[in-house]
Each structure stands twice: as structure tokens, then as C-alpha cells.
Amino acid sequence: MRSTPVEPREREQLNKEQRKYIRAALRDLRARPDIHACYRTAQLLAMIDSQHGRVKYQEGFALSIAPVQHAWNTIDGKLFDLTFDLLEKRGHSCADVQYFGIAVPTDEVKRVVCKLASYGSVLEEICRERKSSVHIVSFHRFSPVANEVSCATAWAHGTLISDFDEFLQAVAEWKSGNGSSSPL
């Protein structure tokens, strides 16, 4: 399986029209972002915009002080995160957050959310559905003191994957026993 280098991304400044578009989508949802609901917020935004396709759902890890499993969005390819924006509005410093993740197709997000009738990790549910031994892990080695990450989003027992199709391939390989049997 091919392994794509995973580069960290940071939140990007949205232009006035993009900010207006997101606000309108939130009004349409009648939903407000919540600090403890990153999956819900990001999934709803992507699903409500599915006809236009400007807002995409991303899932992986956010790295600030320590890595945390997280979900966010992009609009027109620019990364934005309503959860960390809300934290900043409440006085927390989130300026240096780095994101490592995979863009998940909106049809997969819809399918999993409808199946579960709840919000959560789409990628973990795909692993459960396919009875795969792929585990979603944060980082091989992380030094909070040096703030160093030796590898980013690690899927499939250490294989770095940044593409949804590669993720599905890894799930299939691990299910069929073609992957290594030792986790990390």
C-alpha cells in the first residue's frame, strides 16, 4: 500500500464571503457550535452543504498541547474549525493548532450518521463495520516538552494515510490479514 506523507495544516483566514456562507449554513441548521461536539458540528456543516460541495468534512487529530482526536471542515480548500474558534472566543489560546487528517466524502458521513443516529468518528465506525483490526492512533512518538511529532495521523498500525481511498484499502488489507499483526 502506498503511504502519502502527511503534512500538518493550520487554520486559514476565511474571506468575508466564506464567513458569510458558514454563518448562513449554521442558521439553516439551527445549530450552534459546541466545544464538546466537534464531530456533530463538522458533520452537520458538510451534510447541509452537500449539494454545493464547498464545505468538506475532515477527521483526524488536532495538535495543540497534546494530540486529540478531532473533526473540522474546509471550505473551498481552506481549513476552518468552529470548535477551536469557540474556544478562542472563550479566552483559550488556540493559535498554533496543527491538524492531521483525512477528508471523508460527505456521502460516507451521511451514511454513518444515519446508521448510528448519532455523531462520532466516521473512520472508527467504518473500521467496526468491516471488522477490521485497523486502529486509529494519534502519534508514534510525541514529545510535549519538545513539541515534536515524528509522524502525523497514523492509521493501520503506523502506516501514514492522508487519503480516504487509502484508508479504505488499509481497512480491507487488515481485515483480510494482509497487514502486519503487531500494532505499532
Image: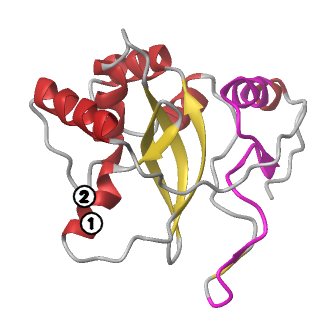
Comes first in the chain, label 2 or label 1: 2
Vertical order, 25 against 145 (above or below): above
Q: Amino acid at mark 1?
A: Leu
Percent of width and height locating residue 12: 47, 52
- Residue 71 position in % (x across, y down): 44, 45
List x then y, in percent, for residue 8. 65, 56
In the image, is residue 40 above or below residue 184? Answer: above
Magenta segment boundaries in residue numbering: 145-172
Identity of the amino acid at label 2? Ile
Tag 2 near tag 1, CB within 8 Å = yes
In which quadrant of the rendered image does the N terminus lie?
Answer: top right
Q: Is residue 52 left or right of residue 79?
A: left
Residue 40, can we see it?
no
Left or right: residue 48 compared with residue 76? left
User: Which quadrant would the C terminus be assigned to in this image?
Assistant: bottom right
Q: Secondary structure at mark 1?
A: helix
Helix, strand or loop under label 2 = loop
- Residue positioned 51% across, 42% down in the render: 59
Is 155 inside the magenta-drawn segment?
A: yes
Residue 147 falls in which quadrant of the image? bottom right
Foreground: 5 or 158? 5
| The residue positioned farthest toward the top in the image shown | 51
Residue 87's mark?
A: 1
**From the viewer's perspective, is the residue at label 2 or at label 1 nearer?**
1
Q: Which residue is mark 2?
A: 35
